[in-house]
Image (cartoon, coloured by chain):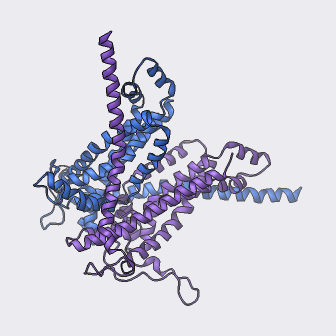
Chain colours: A purple, B blue
Amino acid sequence: MEDIKKRIRIIKFLDYIFAIAGLLSTLVGLVLLFTLLIDLFIDGAPRLGYKFMTSFPSRFPEEAGILSAWVGTFLVMLVTAGAAVPLGIAAGIYLEEYAKKNWLTNIVEINISNLAGVPSIVYGLLALGLFVYFFNFGESILTGGLALALLILPIVIMATREAIRSIPNSIREASYALGATKWQTVQSHIIPYSTGGILTGIIIGLSRAIGETAPIITVGALTFIAFLPSSPITSEFPFISFKWLMDPFTVMPIQMFNWVSRPQAGFHVNAAAAGIILMVMTLLMNGLAIYIRYRFRKKIKW
Amino acid sequence: MYFRSKRNLIKKIKEGAIETTLFLSAVSSVFITISIVVVLSYESFGFFKEIPIIEFLTGTQWTPLFAEPKFGILPLVAGTLLITFIALMVALPLGLTGAIYLSEYAPHRFRETVKPILELLEAVPTVVYGYFALLFLTPILQKFIPDLPGFNALAPGIIIGIMIIPYVSSVSEDAMKAVPMHIREGSYAMGATRFQTAIKVIIPSAFSGIAAAFIMGISRAIGETMVVAIAAGMMPNFTANPLEPIQTLTSYIVQVSLGDVPHGTIEYKTIFVAGITLFLMTLILNIIGFWLRKRIREAY
């Protein structure tokens, strides 16, 4: 009897120890993350300011700024969103509403799942061979934007599919019962109800694209540019120009990479400051995505 | 009657056109994969016309940019595998233990608050992780390991491990949550503690999911570029010692892309050859992972 009681005590003790170990394991990642973020903030805060945001890079760390970098990021994101959003949503709608359960659909699904796991630098190599040289787009904003669009396409497709999947079938059946065609159902019911989830996916995809460095380096973004790409808005008719698509450029993560790689400590401060701005952008976008998902979930009551 | 069927015809054509457009969008993903394979193979083919494949696969020196170039891929593969190994040493224990805690022990509210914050670990841009590896972790490690060089494999390995914890943790946890409640209850009814249930009942049942998490973690670590490019140095090094600088398949591609390499030269082709090696490694891992995750959903 005593032997059994002792064994039970030991087993319960192990259970308790493991609970502590599990709790610590969960928290270790969080604690580390916060430590790193605080370190980044301490390192980079001195350099933040209006001057930093509006100067070009320079040989002197105190003079260097991220103007060309964040303008480049903004323009590249325009291209990325313009390419990935329509293509991704259309593909997601097809796979959820129209596709039949045959071998072709299976191949497409395996494909998308695989593309989600391809290392980002391979997308850079694809863009280098295909867009820079084969299509002759050169080392331009267009190439960079398209490379990132291909990278986040699986994210947009999967988010669209999840959003559409959560719509109960009764809605679809009611629509067909009234005589609507498939497209009418999609247009009037499926798309409005899934907009929240789709938007969330797009924002998460874009926040991922903002931080991606490897594919952009591979397509040849420059790391020291002291000029801005041509403006999309011109002062003469027709007021919109597309010349900026073919201009050389740089983006924020590349600027940070360039500064971190230099031996002088002054540039490390700049790198930290650029990192803070990148983190703020990423956190804001992820927060926005979560907020949109929450708001849409509240509005819709099945 | 005639008027109504003409309107129906227009409707049918419109529906068909829309369906075709949507179909082409879906199939574009297949074209992307085909393009990747074509681009990588085309340049690699050109490479293997000049360099025999035996030298490529078995050579232990990788110096394509030197005056006397050597083209053995093994140092880069060794670097990639070393980083991956260190990362998994960090991510697997922490991720799995954390997943068991979240799935079997934690109260519901704890899980709901902690999971989104853990996902934040994934959202941090990799350059920022590279900054930490070089300027925060390496100095700290140098206090414990006096001879540690500024560029080494240990710091980026640890950072990549931290980065993929949420990956490993969430896939494992999904697998464990998919085990039906009645199996757990049967175990508790026999008097087992949560720890015994987790180790002897849940983990064996969820094994394919946990293996999938393992595989996804490896694939993610293999493809990681910026952390290694910033903190591991750019020296191809055929070694298993984490205290030395190394170069991986990914950071080699970055190194060449940063420089001035004209289109069509053998150096240009080397980045595609490194790329195809990388792509094949992750393709095989991803397919195994996909198949394993499908099994979780089908098993119950």
Q: In the image, is B143 to the left or to the right of B300?
A: left
Observer able to see residue B24: no
Q: Residue drawn at (41%, 56%), measured in percent from left and top?
A: B123
Residue A17 appears left or right of B142: right
Q: Observer-nearest residue: A50 or B65?
A: A50
Q: Against A238, is B172 above or below?
A: above
Furthest toward the bottom, the residue is: A236
Identify the image quadrant of residue B15.
bottom right
- The residue positioned 31% from the left and 17% from the top of the image is A7
Residue B230 percent location from the top left of the image: 25, 62
Query: Is residue A115 visible to us here?
Result: yes
Q: Nearer the viewer, residue B175 or A287?
A: A287
Q: From this viewpoint, which residue is outermost toward the front?
A: A2
Q: Quadrant of residue B252?
A: bottom left
Expressed as whole percent of the image width and height from the top left, the position of residue A26 reads 37, 43
Can you give x and y, in whole percent of width and height, for residue B168 in the image?
37, 43
Tell me which residue sits at (15%, 63%) in the image: B69
Residue lying farthest to the top in this orientation: A1
Quadrant of the snapshot with the N terminus of chain B: bottom right
Count of number-bearing discs: 0
Between residue A91 and residue B19, name the one nearer to us.
A91
Q: Residue A170: x and y, percent?
A: 71, 43
In the picture as drawn, the residue positioned furthest to the left comes out as B147
Q: In the picture shown, does residue A54 fall above or below A218?
A: below
